[in-house]
Amino acid sequence: MLQVGINKKVFLDKAEINDKGSLVITFQTGEAVKATPVDDLLNNTAGVKPSSGTNIIVWPVKTQDNGQDRQAKDIANDLRAVRDQLEHLLLGYVTSDRATLDPYAGIDKSDTAAFIASLSNQSRVDAIYKNLVNQFIAKVKELKDQLPVKSFRLLLVRRSANNHYGTFRKNFITDNPFWESEQIPDTSSRVKFTNYEIKKGLNSGEPVAKESVADAVQSTGNSAADAILGAR
């Protein structure tokens, strides 16, 4: 079971859409099996020899929060975060050109102002989310031969002050990766908690009483246009 912290010997197992329309990414932890003896094929499974499995859900982006309309820039930042998280995982296996996801497939973005205004429409936001997750799932399937043999470090942050389950880091992933090949020596690893995450307690997976804490929210500094229209 993966937890908040730096998890080692992690393998991406599969990605699929659940019955709620959310992307579910399954990870395994364990040891890679480089080969299976011919005379023992019936007793061994090639690839990862898992010790446990963990699902991480990449939630669809919503245009409302508790019945209130959200600002376009916040919706844009959430969509950017989904794109960046998924591309970051793919970059563990392929070059950046092959990891790139197109959020705009079938969507007219020629008028920037109109496009940003359209982010108040849940169907438009759903279309962008589906573009990202469906392309990600397709690319993961193409990587099926690499998945069982490439192990990674995976950093999970606490979801919030009153939710101790782990999730992907959302912001500034290029400078602060959460997914890193274990071929990189520990001494050269860039996977670590940021000062902000430590200050907010997002590096701890300890359960706490819900009534005793306020929700900790990660901040972003991107404009709507920069977040969606290609800026990294």
Image (cartoon, rainbow, N blue to C red):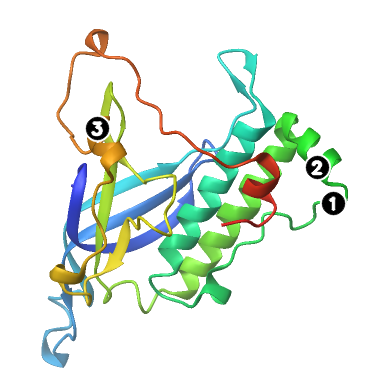
**Circle 1: element type:** loop
Disc 1 from disc 2: Cα separation: 8 Å
Q: Which mark is residue 174?
A: none
Measured as percent of width and height from the top left, residue 109 is found at 82, 51
Whichever of labels 2 and 3 marks the residue nearer the N terminus, that label is 2
Residue annotated with mark 3: 199
Whichever of labels 1 and 2 marks the residue nearer the N terminus, that label is 1
Measured as percent of width and height from the top left, residue 65 is found at 57, 19
Q: How many marks?
A: 3
Pointers 1 and 2 in contact (C-beta within 8 Å): yes
Disc 3 from disc 1: Cα separation: 41 Å
Q: Amino acid at mark 1?
A: Asp
The part of the image, by quadrant, that contains residue 30 is: bottom left
Residue annotated with mark 2: 115
Q: Amino acid at mark 3?
A: Lys
In this view, 124 is above or below 92 = above
**Circle 3: element type:** helix
Which residue sits at x=79%, y=56%? Answer: 106
Q: Amino acid at mark 2?
A: Phe
Pointers 3 and 1 in contact (C-beta within 8 Å): no
**Circle 2: element type:** helix
Q: Is residue 2 visible?
A: no
Q: Nearer the viewer, mark 3 or mark 1?
A: 3
Query: Dot 2, how many residues are within 10 Å of its Cα: few (below 14), some (14-19), or many (20+)?
Result: some
Disc 2 from disc 3: Cα separation: 36 Å
Outermost residue, top side: 211
Whichever of labels 3 and 1 marks the residue nearer the N terminus, that label is 1
The part of the image, by quadrant, that contains residue 205 is: top left
Q: Which mark is residue 108?
A: 1
